[in-house]
Image (tube, grey):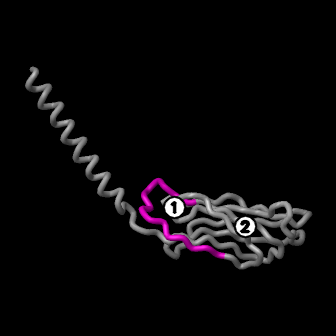
């Protein structure tokens, strides 16, 4: 009985070691590199700030002073279940657009459109891009 327990424990430890070594190997380059492109187009004439997931998985931001605008980042180790996000809008102190103007925001992965949102300005000319997300 004790020998069976030891063999079972040894087998479980071996399986755990194999799985851990496989996951470590896959962590080096599990999904390869994915090129993510964030894009804003439309007729909005004001300024806005956009926030996006950058190359390191942290948040990056940029001031958009005219449209069209786009930003490409190379995401390494794009593993299933992980993803990127993108959003933005008018911030106090930035020039407003005009009421009724619109934008379309998109996320592309390796050149293929994955998600998009359309939005229009409020009565004051401010705009808010809904948060977009793409999961690998």
Residue 90 in magenta stretch: no
Q: Which quadrant holds residue 93? A: bottom right
- Give residue 24's position: percent from left, percent from top: 31, 53
Residue 72 in magenta stretch: yes
In contact (CB < 8 Å): disc 2 and disc 1: no
Q: Kindly identify the residue that appears in the image at 80 percent across and 71 percent down.
A: 47
- Give residue 7's position: percent from left, percent from top: 12, 31
In space, the residues marked 2 and 1 are separated at their CA atoms by 27 Å
- For the residue labelled by badge 1, is the local secondary structure a helix, a strand or a loop? loop
- For the residue labelled by badge 2, is the local secondary structure a helix, a strand or a loop? strand
Counting residues from the start of the chain, the first of labels 2 and 1 encountered is 1
Label 2: how many residues lie within 10 Å, few (<14), some (14-19) or many (20+)? some
Q: Residue 118 — which label? A: 2
Locate the N terminus by quadrant: top left
Q: Kindly identify the residue that appears in the image at 87 percent across and 69 percent down.
A: 96
Q: Residue 32 — which label? A: none
Query: Residue most toward the top?
Result: 1
Magenta stretch: give its range. Answer: 70-84
- Give residue 48's position: percent from left, percent from top: 77, 67
Q: In this view, does 99 lie to the left or right of 90?
A: right
118 lies above or below 9: below
Residue bearing the label numbered 1 = 56
Query: Residue most toward the right?
Result: 124
Q: Which quadrant holds residue 3? A: top left
Q: Is residue 114 left or right of residue 104?
A: left
Q: Kindly identify the residue that appears in the image at 64 percent across and 60 percent down.
A: 132
68 lies above or below 106: below
Mark toward the viewer: 2 or 1: 1
Q: In this view, does 81 lie to the left or right of 101?
A: left
Magenta span: predominant SS is strand
- Give residue 114's position: percent from left, percent from top: 56, 67
Q: Kindly identify the residue that appears in the image at 75 percent across and 71 percent down.
A: 103
């Amino acid at each position: 009985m004790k020998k069976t327990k030891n063999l079972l424990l040894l087998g479980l430890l071996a399986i755990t070691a194999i799985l851990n070594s496989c996951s470590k190997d896959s962590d080096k380059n599990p999904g390869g590199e994915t090129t993510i492109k964030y894009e804003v187009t439309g007729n909005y004439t004001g300024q806005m700030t956009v926030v996006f997931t950058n190359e390191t998985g942290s948040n990056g931001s940029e001031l958009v002073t005219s449209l069209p605008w786009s930003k490409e980042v190379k995401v390494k180790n794009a593993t299933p279940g992980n993803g990127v996000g993108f959003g933005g809008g008018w911030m106090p102190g930035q020039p407003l657009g005009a009421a009724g103007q619109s934008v379309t925001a998109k996320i592309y992965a390796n050149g293929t459109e994955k998600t998009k949102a359309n939005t229009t300005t409020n009565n004051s000319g401010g705009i808010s891009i809904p948060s977009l997300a793409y999961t690998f």
